Image (cartoon, grey):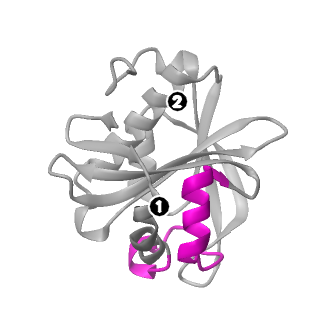
Amino acid sequence: MLEGKRVNLRVAEKEDAPFLAQWFNDVGFIGDYQSFPIQVSRNQLEAQVLEHKLYGHEWVNFIVEKKDGTKIGEACHYISAPNFGWTEIGYAIVPEERGKGYGTEAIQILVDYLFLSRDIVRMQAVIDSENLASRRALEKAGFKKEGTIRKALWNAKGKWADAHLFGILREEWIEPRMLQTLE
């Protein structure tokens, strides 16, 4: 369990696959700005959660929970370019809990966790160029916009959208914001 001030992240388990599948297949949860290329089955998610792999490469899902245990979202980290070893993060919060800072805290927890536990130089996130809330959350967590990837995401609106690439370097991170030590 990765403990923050208002939310915790815990590694997803097989029992989480049904509601993860429900979330990932719900346009309301995905929102207007998430890439929406395929539907995800419960069986696919169970395998992904148990193996910590997707498409043969590392992919670790976390459940974002309030301190009272209420599940309010998901976060993940994965290797997005195996030949370079790029670590990428993703996150989504249920619509009724958006805009309350939970996503920003989940990002900060993931950043701390990954820099504390791995010998990586950088991590990145890719977002829809119109997703201002996600941009603000990444910037609050120390990420910087690195570029635009044109027509990179097929979104729930049924159109191609440009994506912004954000990154944070280890030397920009400096010290943990949420996590102090890993047990």
The single residue placed furthest to the right in the displayed view is 83
Name which residue lies at 41% across and 15% down. 175
Rendered view: 30 above or below 50:
below
Query: Looking at the image, which is closer to me, 81 or 8?
Result: 8
> How many numbered callouts?
2
Name which residue lies at 36% across and 17% down. 181
Q: Amino acid at mark 2?
A: Leu
Q: Which residue is mark 2?
A: 114
- Callout 2 crowding tier (Cα within 10 Å): few <14, some 14–19, many ≥20: some
Residues in magenta, as a range: 25-53
Secondary structure of residue under mark 2: helix
Find residue 37 and report its image quarter. Answer: bottom right
Place of residue 42 in the rendered image (x, y in percent of width and height, measured from the top left) = 53, 75
Quick one: quadrant of the N terminus?
top left
Secondary structure of residue under mark 1: helix
Q: Earlier in the sequence, mark 1 or mark 2?
A: 1
Rendered view: 13 above or below 36:
above
Whole-angstrom CA distance, mark 1 to mark 2, is 23 Å
Q: Amino acid at mark 1?
A: Lys
Q: Which mark is residue 2?
A: none
Place of residue 45 in the rendered image (x, y in percent of width and height, measured from the top left) = 56, 66
Query: Looking at the image, which is closer to me, 13 or 31?
Result: 13
Q: Which residue is mark 1?
A: 14
Q: Is residue 98 left or right of residue 27?
A: left
